[in-house]
Image: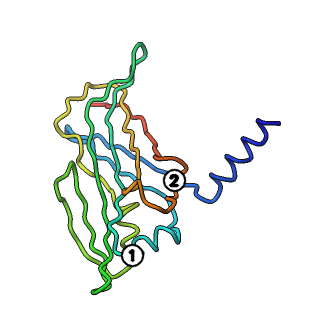
Amino acid sequence: MFAVLLISALLAVSGPFDQTLKVAPLPRDGQVLVSFKLQQELTDEVRTTIRSGMAVSFVYKIDLRRSSAVWVDRTLASTVVRATVRYDNLTRRYLLTRTLDNRVERPDTTDSEEVAWRWLTDQFDRLPLFSSVHLESNGEYYVRVSAHAAPRNAGFVWPWRGDDVSAFTRFTLIR
């Protein structure tokens, strides 16, 4: 009986906030290009928070890892990509910022809520994140991306089931 109640409660909590994180690594010319996309609908709570003028960030931690049959998988390199949106109530424009390991990469502005939401969730195509890592031919690797929203201590509910959503994709380096 307890198990049935627990499963029902978990399904009720996770139901309307299903999201998918898709990851696509592409090893090319001595570097690994990474594309990823968070498929998540903009909720009313997140929209209200953005429209309040508060900076909202989605933080993506990307790990390049090597599989190991004997021991724990080894992390070869890690990087953090932060996409931030801040709505300016005076100009009615969204200020967009993208950082890569705390270096500002692409600041921009828009007046479209849809463009701002895509900035947070799905405009991460072929990012050259791992160029200094030596990869062995015929080696089995994978890229893992985990995401969370910031600030985490907000007084509203984020559309994640827990603190993070994550996904990974394996690839073999063939030269």
* Residue type highlighted by circle 1: Ser
Quarter of the image for residue 52 reads bottom left
- Which-is-in-front pick, marks 1 and 2? 1
* Residue type highlighted by circle 2: Trp
Foreground pick, 155 / 159: 155
The secondary element bearing badge 1 is classed as loop
Foreground pick, 52 / 148: 52
Q: Residue furthest top?
A: 70
Residue at the spot of label 1:
52
Q: Is residue 168 above or below residue 137?
A: below
Coloration mode: rainbow
Query: Looking at the figure, which quarter contains the N terminus?
Result: top right
Q: Position of residue 100 (x, y in %)?
A: 22, 52
Q: Is residue 127 above or below residue 115?
A: above
Task: Tell me if mark 2 has few (under 14), some (14-19) or many (20+) residues whose alpha carbon lies within 10 angstroms of its own.
Answer: some
Task: Tell me if mark 1 has few (under 14), some (14-19) or many (20+) residues whose alpha carbon lies within 10 angstroms of its own.
Answer: few
Q: Residue at 40%, 53% (x, y): give it.
A: 152
Q: Residue at 39%, 39% (x, y): give it.
A: 144
**In the image, which disc is placed on residue 144?**
none
Q: Is residue 44 above or below residue 128?
A: below
Residue at the spot of label 2:
160
Q: Position of residue 69 (x, y in %)?
A: 43, 16
Q: Position of residue 114 (x, y in %)?
A: 42, 75
